[in-house]
Amino acid sequence: MDTDGTHETRPTRAGHIPRPAAPPKPSHAPTAGPTLGDWLRVPRSSDGPGVWTYGHVPRAAEEPEVTPTRQLVSGALIALLAGLLLWSLLWNGYLGGFWLWPLYMFTPDSWAGTLPSVVASYVWYSIVATILIVGFGRLGRWPELLRRLLRSRAVRPLHSAEPARPEPGGEDDPVRWPQLRGAGLSEVADRLEGEAGGGRMNDVDYARIRRAWDSVRVDPSRMRAFADSVRDKGAGACVHPSGDRDLPVRAARHDLLARQVLLGTVEDGVRNPYARRGTSLALDPDVLGTSLLAVGPSGTGKTQRLVRPVVESLALQALAGQAAVVAVGAAGAQLGPDAAYDVVVRIGDPASVYDLDLYGGASDPDEAATLLAEAFVGDVPGIDVRRAATALAQLLGPFRTAYGRFPAVPELRELLDRVPAAFDALRRELAADGAQHAMLRELDARTRQHGAHGDPGPALADRVALLDRPAFAGFFDTTGQGRPFSLRALEHPIRVRVDLPERGHADASRMLARLLLAQFNAAAAARADRSLFAFLAFDDASHTLTPETVRGVQRLRSAHAGVLLTLRSLDDVPEGLRTPLLGAVGCRMAFSGVTTWDGKAFAEAWGTEWVETRDVTHRTVFADQPLTRAIHAFRKLVTGKAVTTDAVTVRQVERERWSASDLAHAVPPGHAVLSLTSVKGERAAPLLVRLAGTA
């Protein structure tokens, strides 16, 4: 499929092995769990970033005072014994007969010894017993103890009751598309309601058509085309250019109405704020727009529990016309099947249908040179990236002027090595056009600087040589014969996966990863239409970050874009970039098993908070009276402990939210500590989360 969504039959890079045709897609995705109507009617509410809004009911901000169960049991038992004692005293007449006066006052003397007298007596006894049970029950807090035993925990007060659900068939029922009916498109709404009721519409269809309707509200001239498409195709209207209406497989739970993916559950423990304990945690473009950095050793589930669910969520949103996603990982990384993507670039694989545009679709030589310099030598200490970009521009400009294209990898390497034949051929092409004096001056300047002290040319040539290998023959083509993918396609709802040859060409893979990050930063900021959320996910961002790309990541918030960076350790980032990186991203995630050195960086980024501490001092009680001393001696004989009093000191102290030691040793396997920041500036304190993983 082309980046514009059209289909055509094409040969593979090998030239003779046809690509197998994909099986036909079902008309709609099978649903599991609630029906589409039930799913739409579930209320969605949020009280902070990262809250899974589907059916969420906000909790109290602070934990209520809870009486210990042992104290409840002892109080209930004492109240029961006191009640039985009082009843026994009343029944046996030890307190007199005053409690029977109401019975004598309201029963006539003629009832004495008759059945009505017996019935009236037992009714009165029942009334008195009920009064005692209610009174001593409230005194002993029996209802609270009963609830504690039935639910195994105290009842948690909520801010408010669960919001009411729309009635099926009502005016506000989302299945009936009230927004379309309000605009006078009742016929279109009826068609969509019938599609949903007949099971021919899934969640992607609903989100996609709602997105199309939002575009109609912005541009009313599209209303007729929208209405005609829905009348003709029903739930298949406004379909993605690929024709897909769902992914072939889902490995996580998604809520496309809220554009969220379920990541896990916040642990119900004292380390987490009370309002978030036990709630589900999700990610959406509102928090991913501030970018996310995840650090954890190999085997902690960064790919299966974070990268793939997030990429899958953005791929579903791309099918709904809401996002564009690019996933970058080593060949063989479990980022989803090929059928879940529109474009799959397998660099170094001769069977790859798509190629990668080395210049990112740029037409300006200076822009292309800046991106290449950042990728080639941005990680080399002592080399000025701007000077390297100037050296590249002195070659790219003349070459593009002479040949109408940028040089391929072998040609660029020859120019950087100043091979005489390549330089002479380029000079002849420029000299043939007498008007290209500026380009000749650029070429002469490069000739003079070649070999001089501090010339970045040799370092650039060495880096280009990493791509001028037999494994990459035919890739990075600039003659127009291949099918290069460019990140300029981010203005379309496209799904892309780039497989890097990490196993055999690690240095080249890291260089290409830096190139993709630099191109993404430039392409996301240069988009004319930023209505789509653009996202770039790295399964492994080791040795990918440079000072300029870190600054570019920080600027993505205003461009409606974000990146996901995963690292095995912060040691994979230059020491001078670790603090700027943690400051550039709004979401930080530490998996179980991080080192104390990495934990220290996270602890500093998360800062401190004021907490209330209680210091208890035990002091031995010395009695003066003989009887009291005897009681204390007997108590010490029974319990084995001296009689003491407790002095409690309460004070406010400032402590780290999560210390380096806690992050290294107190995070259980399958868990992570995650802090979130939304593009609006809302923040969620670091939360200990039990990750859900993938199905």
Image: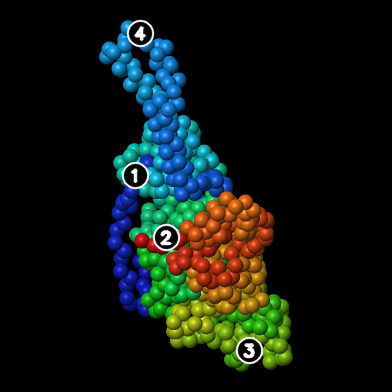
Image quarter of the C terminus: bottom left
Distance from the alpha carbon under mark 4 to that under mark 2: 76 Å
Amino acid at circle 3: Pro
Mark 3 lies on residue:
458
Distance from the alpha carbon under mark 2 to that under mark 3: 49 Å
Label 2 neighbour load within 10 Å: few <14, some 14-19, many 20+: some
Residue 109 is labelled as: 4
Distance from the alpha carbon under mark 1 to that under mark 3: 63 Å
Q: In this view, does 447 lie above or below 548?
A: below
Q: Between disc 4 and disc 2, whose residue precedes?
A: 4
Amino acid at circle 2: Ala
Distance from the alpha carbon under mark 1 to that under mark 2: 23 Å
Residue name at image x 71 percent, y 78 percent: 438
Q: Between disc 1 and disc 3, whose residue precedes?
A: 1
Direction from residue 563 to residue 649 in the image, left or right: right
- Contact between marks 4 and 3 (CB within 8 A): the answer is no
Q: Nearer the viewer, residue 348 or 509?
A: 509
Residue 35 is labelled as: 1
